[in-house]
Image: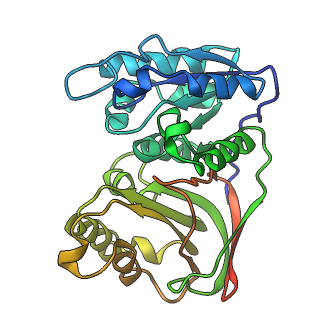
Amino acid sequence: MKSYLRPDYLKRGDTVAVVALASSLSEASRQTMYWKELLESWGLHVKTGRHLYDSAPGEFAGRDEDRAADLTEMLLDPEVKAIISFRGGYGSMRTVRKMDLSLFDKHPKWLVGFSDITVFHAVLQSRGIESILGAMPSTIGPEAGPDAKISEESLRKALFGEIRSYRTAPHAYSVAGSARGRLVGGNLSLVVSCLRTPWENHLDEDSILFIEDVDERMYNLDRMLLTLQQGGFFARPKGIVIGQFTDTSGEDEWQRKALDLVHEYMPADKPVLFGFDCGHEHPNYSLYLGREVTLDVTPDGGFLKFI
């Protein structure tokens, strides 16, 4: 396996940046500073993007070039050690096209987010740089429920280099087996959107694929899974981890749940772990994407270990 670049873990006194890379902030998000107080409680200093609170037609957080400028500024800022996207939504691919992507190589830093931010994870994977799939400011806070605290703590541990492994409970759809490879993937719809782009992951090295999704209709979920299956995508990884599939509409008409449909497309000849708490619900456990992992699935549950 090729060597990936791993940014330095954070320590107390470091500075993190919060920027908007895709959709604009909701009105509720504009009224709270919980996220800033949380990061500061971890001993971190916080910088915010100049265009964090901007909005533009299409529900974007400002113009594409302004979102790209904020990320570029934080990459070039020597004080900033990690960059957190405030939310996902839509717009990351539009932001990417306005950037000089070589800056990620010259100034490697932890980039944090999930959902639409999967595009940035794909870009970093294509360049051999690790990143963190984890909770964002828009998804945490007292109103998010008690399990949001677990997501927050998981993000803290990821930033400070404290995550070593995860254990999961047994799941009826899991397929037993062991595998080793690089952890890649993210939001299913964005994995599909990255096909035929420069940052498509062809899974041409040993890989463990992670997928999750939210707010899809069953027919669209089926279309994406069918596209990947027919393209041989699910046949390439050494193992697969299935995260949360949340708020899927049309389940009654299809007479099955989203995970039932996902299960229908999973291979039976390699380890497949269902029931991993990562995605658009809480708890949302952080993952080091681009990191080599071992995956062990048994009738007693699953074990994902970072190498």
Q: Quadrant of residue 180?
A: bottom right
Q: Position of residue 156 (x, y in %)?
A: 71, 39
The correct choice, above or below, for 182 with respect to 109 in the image is below
Does the rendering let one see residue 306? no
The correct choice, above or below, for 258 with respect to 281 in the image is below
Q: Residue at x 48, y 47 (%)?
A: 122
Q: Quadrant of residue 297?
A: bottom right
Q: Position of residue 128 (x, y in %)?
A: 61, 45
Q: Residue at x 24, y 82 (%)?
A: 255
Q: Position of residue 19 (x, y in %)?
A: 49, 23
Is residue 22 rendered to the left or right of residue 237?
Answer: left
Q: How many marks?
A: 0
Please state which of residues 154 and 9 is positioned toward the viewer in this rendering: 154
The correct choice, above or below, for 32 with respect to 129 in the image is above
Q: Position of residue 27 (x, y in %)?
A: 35, 24
Please state which of residues 10 and 37 is positioned toward the viewer in this rendering: 37
Please state which of residues 31 and 50 is positioned toward the viewer in this rendering: 31
Q: Quadrant of the N terminus?
A: bottom right
Q: Residue at x 42, y 29 (%)?
A: 21
Is residue 243 rendered to the left or right of residue 213?
Answer: right
